[in-house]
Image (spheres, rainbow, N blue to C red):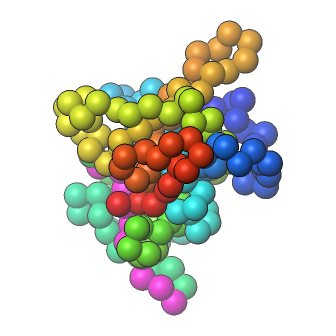
Amino acid sequence: MQTPSLLPKRLSSVSDDDDTLRTVVFSLANMENTSISQYIFALPVAAVDRAIVYPNERAILRDGIGMMNLGDRTLTIVDLRQKFTTIDPQQDTSKFLILFHTQAGELCGLPVKDAPVLLDIAPDTIRSIPLAYREVNQLSFVSHMAIVPQENGLEPIQILILGLDRPLAQSSGITSHLN
């Protein structure tokens, strides 16, 4: 899914608003014909190490989890797309890898479609996703979403937020780490 109104806020963006949740927003590749195609995803900036161009040497995945050597480190690769569809490694169009830290501090990689974008999300746009919906739609790893309004009458952007602690803290104390 394209996010044209967000593109000017590439990773060099800076925000002075301390009341928002600063996130890295991204799309998953090869998801056009799935139930999740209308959503984009976000990780709290606090959990993100950096985004890199996805190396030519791809991780061999089993059930969406794999390993990859990157420099002097071996990373766990977490491919969320495997929750929704089978991805043929030869057809993978992921262009970037978001390196993030789990709650335990382990560095992992997440393949994404295009370069991620910074977005500050207002706390009043964040809501819990009902447990029943998450279970039916294989979204157990997502507990919250943001409905971000757009200008000029465009449809709001629906963003599934990964890595928010449960329960979501009050607007002044939003915390972030991946489970």
Q: Residue furthest bottom?
A: 72
Residue at 67 percent of width and 43 percent of height: 19
Residue at 65 percent of width and 43 percent of height: 20
Residue at 31 percent of width and 48 percent of height: 141
Q: Position of residue 36 (x, y in %)?
A: 37, 32
Residue 76 to residue 42: above or below: below
Asked if residue 99 lies left or right of residue 69, the reply is right
Residue 175 to residue 53: above or below: above
Instruction: Say whether residue 76 is magenta.
Output: yes
Q: Residue furthest top?
A: 153
| Residue 1 visible in this rendered orientation of the protein | no
Depth order, front residue of 36/161: 161
Q: Position of residue 106 (x, y in %)?
A: 41, 76
Depth order, front residue of 23/12: 23
Asked if residue 41 lies left or right of residue 45, the reply is left
- The residue segment tinted magenta is 72-82
